[in-house]
Amino acid sequence: MGSTLPAVAEELLKEIKKAFQETSHVPDELLLRLRFIFGPCAVPALDLVDQCSVTRVTSPSGRTLYQVLGSSGKLYTCYSSCHFCTCPAFGFSVLQKSVSLLCKHILAVYLSQAMGACQELTVSEEQLTSILLAEEEEEG
């Protein structure tokens, strides 16, 4: 997960991972805490995890990014290493207004990591570069 989240959020994600490993589900108490800490993006993020919308994309060199199929059908690229998502909600609510810790897509990435629910895709270095350049072209 990384050190970009507050300690309380990091600890909660660790507890979710432990509970899921032991029981294959997340107890209601942890779901309530998730909603309390992450606010309105918690439930949509869980929906994305349930729909298997998170894909971990890796290249032979070990570079990793995540792609999340959003509820709108658009594919967003997320970087858990630097806590960033390419969606408009992240840009507005997290970066510009600072009213949220993260968007539903990056939370879905963290939850998928905790629950071992990521799809896996290995691509060549060239394919990974194409993914990164496609995101840059869309933003520019």
Image (cartoon, helix red, strand yellow):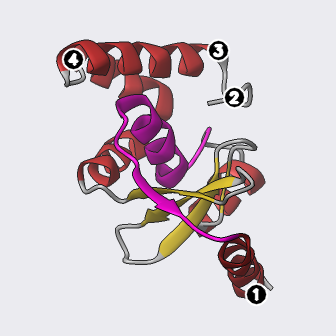
**SS for dot 2:** loop
Label 4 to label 2: alpha-carbon separation? 24 Å
- Dot 3 or dot 1, earlier in sequence: 3
Label 1 to label 4: alpha-carbon separation? 42 Å
**SS for dot 4:** loop
Q: Are marks 2 and 3 in contact (CB under 8 Å)?
A: no
Query: As shown in the figure, which amino acid type bears the numbered disc 1?
Result: Glu
- Dot 4 or dot 2, earlier in sequence: 2
Q: Is residue 60 left or right of residue 140?
A: left
User: What numbered label is drawn on residue 27?
Assistant: 4
Report the residue marked by disc 1: 137
- Dot 1 or dot 4, earlier in sequence: 4
Report the residue marked by disc 3: 7
**Residue 85 lies in what quarter of the image?**
bottom right
Q: Residues within 10 Å of mark 2 (few under 14, many from 20)?
A: few
Q: Are marks 1 and 2 in contact (CB under 8 Å)?
A: no
User: What numbered label is drawn on residue 120?
Assistant: none
**SS for dot 3:** helix
- Quadrant where the C terminus is found in the figure: bottom right
Q: Residues within 10 Å of mark 1 (few under 14, many from 20)?
A: few
